[in-house]
């Protein structure tokens, strides 16, 4: 299994703000047992998941569908060797989601409601049998082939047309099984002249509209044989900011690990934050600062991107203005591999969770 699928699990969580209070509940969409669903014909399977992907009480015409005024989160639950499930740092997602909603000037989803709703609908799906089972074969490739449950919480505005702000939003959470995000055998990246975010904008918010330009840039890069597109700053087009949907790291020749500093144009990634901590645990010098594309191409010996979906994915080369810099032998570097093993090991329960990042369902 690679990347996302629309084969969402049957139980979803829906919360609504009525102008004064938030109320939410887990609801069940049409479903059969996991075994029965697996035996459905392609046509019947499509019909089932189309029904499951319709929320008839939600208005079609609103600020979210018309103007992209909405935000979302992405987080994962991982099967453990003992048969349990744990979610990676959901408290951080709850905090960021609230900040994103308030950044879009809508009522923020309370963190406690987010976490309670997340746990409730996830447990209900697992009780129905919808979850990936732990496979010891995943250990052979350091969990690169491991499956997990991807959870997508998102906001959705009340019915509206014309420019305005959402005052009574919904919050919906859905889940689906996922595998590796980057399925390409290429590890090449290329800079894009498109602009992801500008100062005084929404680059720090995980909002819907922020993903239009990165999607276009990534697809253009893929059409040219690259795995990833890299964005530079909007003012000078000299400094590296992010990948298409990921934060980015550079291990320099002096062994310093550098990642662009957070600000108005950089998303505060939770995997990014975790990798910084893991590197510091190993005594690695970490710098959060501006890094020019020139410095990155001349001084880096390892490059990788990070994110909930991407995990930690190495970049073998970067092409900028027709010139290409290759890093090492274009395979994953020593530090990158070690940090990947640490991150995945914690998530799947193979390594001690010293920072208490994993929440048991």
Image: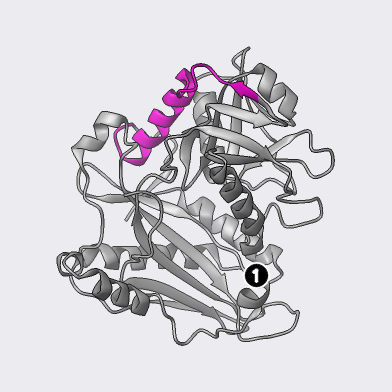
Residue at 26% across / 37% down in the picture? 138
User: Would you place residue 156 above or below residue 103 in this image?
Assistant: below
Total marks placed: 1
Residue 4: give x, y in percent of width and height.
Answer: 40, 56
- In-image side of 257 versus 346 (left or right): right
User: Would you place residue 322 above or below residue 166 in this image?
Assistant: above
- In-image side of 73 versus 296 (left or right): left
Residue 304: give x, y in percent of width and height.
Answer: 54, 31
Residue at 72% across / 22% down in the picture? 295
Residue at 38% across / 63% down in the picture? 175
Quarter that holds the C terminus: bottom left
- In-image side of 277 versus 300 (left or right): left
- In front here: 78 or 179? 179
Residue at 62% across / 13% down in the picture? 253
Mark 1 surroundings within 10 Å by alpha-carbon count, few (fewer than 14), some (14 through 19), many (20 or more): some
The residue indicated by pointer 1 is 68
- In front here: 214 or 141? 214
Residue 114: give x, y in percent of width and height.
Answer: 48, 65
**Range of magenta residues:** 324-351
For label 1, the SS is loop
């Amino acid at each position: 299994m690679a990347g996302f699928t629309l084969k969402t699990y049957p139980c979803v969580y829906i919360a609504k703000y009525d102008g004064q209070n938030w109320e939410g509940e887990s609801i069940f969409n049409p479903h059969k047992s996991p075994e029965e669903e697996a035996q459905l014909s392609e046509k019947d399977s499509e019909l089932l998941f189309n029904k499951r992907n319709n929320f008839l009480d939600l208005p079609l015409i609103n600020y979210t569908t018309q103007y992209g005024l909405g935000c979302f989160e992405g987080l994962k639950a991982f099967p453990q060797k003992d048969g349990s499930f744990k979610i990676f740092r959901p408290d951080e997602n709850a905090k960021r989601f609230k900040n994103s909603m308030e950044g879009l000037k809508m009522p923020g989803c309370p963190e406690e409601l987010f976490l309670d709703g997340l746990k409730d609908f996830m447990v209900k799906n697992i009780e129905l049998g919808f979850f990936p089972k732990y496979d010891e074969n995943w250990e052979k490739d350091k969990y690169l082939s491991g499956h997990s449950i991807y959870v997508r919480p998102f906001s959705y505005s009340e019915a509206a047309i014309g420019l305005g702000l959402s005052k009574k939003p919904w919050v919906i959470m859905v889940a689906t099984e996922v595998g590796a995000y980057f399925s390409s055998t290429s590890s090449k990246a290329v800079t894009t002249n498109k602009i992801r975010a500008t100062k005084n904008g929404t680059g720090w918010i995980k909002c819907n509209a922020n993903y239009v330009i990165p999607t276009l840039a990534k697809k253009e890069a893929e059409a040219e044989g690259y795995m990833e597109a890299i964005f530079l700053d909007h003012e000078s087009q000299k400094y590296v900011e992010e990948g298409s949907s990921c934060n980015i790291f550079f291990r320099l020749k002096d062994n310093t690990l550098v990642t662009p500093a957070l600000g108005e144009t950089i998303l505060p990634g939770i995997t990014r934050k975790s990798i910084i901590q893991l590197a510091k645990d190993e005594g690695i010098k970490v710098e959060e600062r501006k890094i020019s594309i020139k410095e990155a191409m001349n001084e880096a010996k390892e490059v990788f991107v990070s994110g909930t979906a991407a995990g930690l994915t190495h970049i073998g080369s970067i092409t900028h203005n027709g010139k290409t810099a290759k890093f090492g032998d274009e395979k994953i570097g020593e530090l990158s591999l070690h940090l990947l093993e640490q991150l995945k090991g914690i998530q799947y329960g193979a390594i001690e969770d010293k920072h208490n990042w994993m929440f048991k369902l």
